[in-house]
Amino acid sequence: MADGAGKIDIRNSVSEAEWQARVDLAAMYRLTALYGWDDMIFTHISHRVPGPEHHFLINPYGYFFEEITASSLVKVDLDGNIVQETDAMINPAGFTIHSAIHAARDDAHVVMHVHTDQGVAVSAQKEGLLPLSQTAMIVREDVAYHDYEGIALDLDERERLVRDLGEKKHSMILRNHGTLTCGATAAITFSRMFFLERACTMQIMALSAGRDGVLECDTGLQQKVAGQGGMTEHSNGMAKLTDMLVWPALLRKLDRDLPGYAA
């Protein structure tokens, strides 16, 4: 089990608010593994620590997501400097992406980034996410795009990431790279990724029939479904539903299938 904090009793050395953030983030890592979205030890999910300091929690580099616990998460500042006693390290390339969004968006308390086969496949398609499924139309209006610039080691890329995401969108397709979501809570951020990844999977499967062999919904229908789905700026009812019903159900599933995250 990941024990990035060494012998430090994290549970009794942080605030209740930070501990809850740690539990929620550890649950997100475990759920990502459970749904098959992890990429060995790579990709990242980060959570802002409640309070006046600009501190964030991220995974200890070198552990599988199924191993992550609340205590093993590493606390860093906005520049990626570790600000707790720990033997763990973090992946600087990962925090380049996350720090940019956390710094620019006060509403982005949680940022999630994955490299799934289907998400990367759609990111490599010139047309991006197409209106081929109900799921795609629910999230498509909320999706931004960022062109590939290589492995995210260049801090200058942060400015362009923020510009491309904009002030109001919560999902992004990183061209030739993967997918990203952000939000005020672990629950809504994970749910946004669930819908985005499902839409990408459906698109790859549908396009197996060829581009001319699929039905694409018209603009009016796209707008109608976007409004009904509750995942866009103008229709955000999914956030409340997620917090009340979806997230508790996900935690029950996690407790059954991959318990131990809250340690």
Image: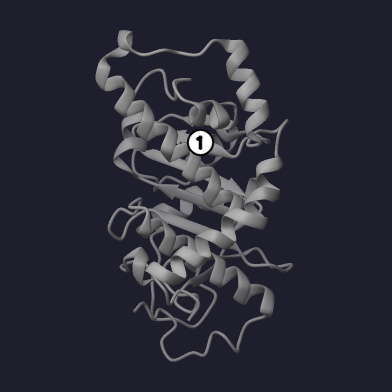
Q: Residues within 10 Å of mark 1 (few under 14, many from 20)?
A: many
Q: Quadrant of residue 169?
A: top right
Q: Which residue shows up at 39% across the image and 45% down it? A: 152
Residue 68: give x, y in percent of width and height: 40, 71
Residue closest to the eye, 177 or 207: 207
Q: Which residue shows up at 37% across the image and 26% down it? A: 203
Q: Which residue shows up at 58% across the image and 18% down it? A: 222
Residue closest to the eye, 8 or 80: 8
Q: Which residue shows up at 29% across the image and 40% down it? A: 117
In this rendering, is residue 75 above or below 191? below
SS for callout 1: strand
Does residue 156 show up? no
Q: Residue furthest top?
A: 212
The quadrant of the image that shows the N terminus is bottom left
Residue type highlighted by circle 1: Met
Q: Which residue is mark 1?
A: 172
Does residue 37 show up? yes
Residue 77: give x, y in percent of width and height: 57, 65
Q: Is residue 97 left or right of residue 241?
A: left
Residue 10: give x, y in percent of width and height: 54, 85
In this rendering, is residue 212 above or below 180? above
